[in-house]
Image: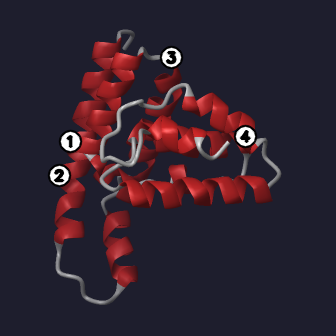
Amino acid sequence: MDSFSEKYHHWQKELQIFDSRVKPVINAPYTGDSSSFYQELHALGLKSRADAIVQQIVDEFPKLTAENRRKVSELVNRYSRINWLTDLMRKVESIEAFRLSLTWFVIMDQGKDTRDAILELESYISKGKTLGYPVKALLQEISRMASEQDRYGWGSTRDLILKRL
């Protein structure tokens, strides 16, 4: 799997599978028991596969052209239910895990709500500072990969990041 096109189609296939398998679980009526909800997600047996795809996408993203990064962001947002299967992007126990989380933030390109994206970014920054990470340098690094498109009228993902330097 060498070309971007091959990788993209592989990711698309995997994300479509995740989306179709997760959708019935997250769209089921809520019973008031979140533990059963997470047990159902776990029972799908897709976590390690989802973790691998997230890791592949994060590893490749910095190497892509701006146009291909845009395509990957659109793909991940189209099939965003992968976020229910993996928690890699919420881990910050090492600087590499923190970098992965910030890169996934860039890939998600504000997701469906800029306000949630701002809170998420500020949470990452706070955790990173608490852990003594070089947050400013990491934000500068990931800002170069971030979209400059203002998707919702609150500024681009790059703007959101740069405002926090």
- Is the Cβ of the residue at disc 2 closer than 8 Å to that at disc 1? yes
Place of residue 111 in the rendered image (x, y in percent of width and height, measured from the top left): 34, 49
| Quadrant where the image shows the N terminus | top left
- Is the Cβ of the residue at disc 4 closer than 8 Å to that at disc 3? no
Nearer the N terminus, badge 4 or badge 2?
2
- Is the Cβ of the residue at disc 4 closer than 8 Å to that at disc 1? no
Residue 69 sits in quarter: top left
Q: Which amino acid does label 3 sit on?
A: Lys
> On the image, numbered disc 2 is attached to which residue?
20
**In this view of the protein, which residue sits in the foreground, 102 or 94?**
102
Going by the picture, which residue comes out furthest to the right?
132
Asked which secondary structure carries label 1, the reply is helix
Residue at (69% x, 59% y) in the render? 126
Total numbered labels: 4
Going by the picture, which residue comes out furthest to the bottom?
32
Nearer the N terminus, badge 2 or badge 3?
2
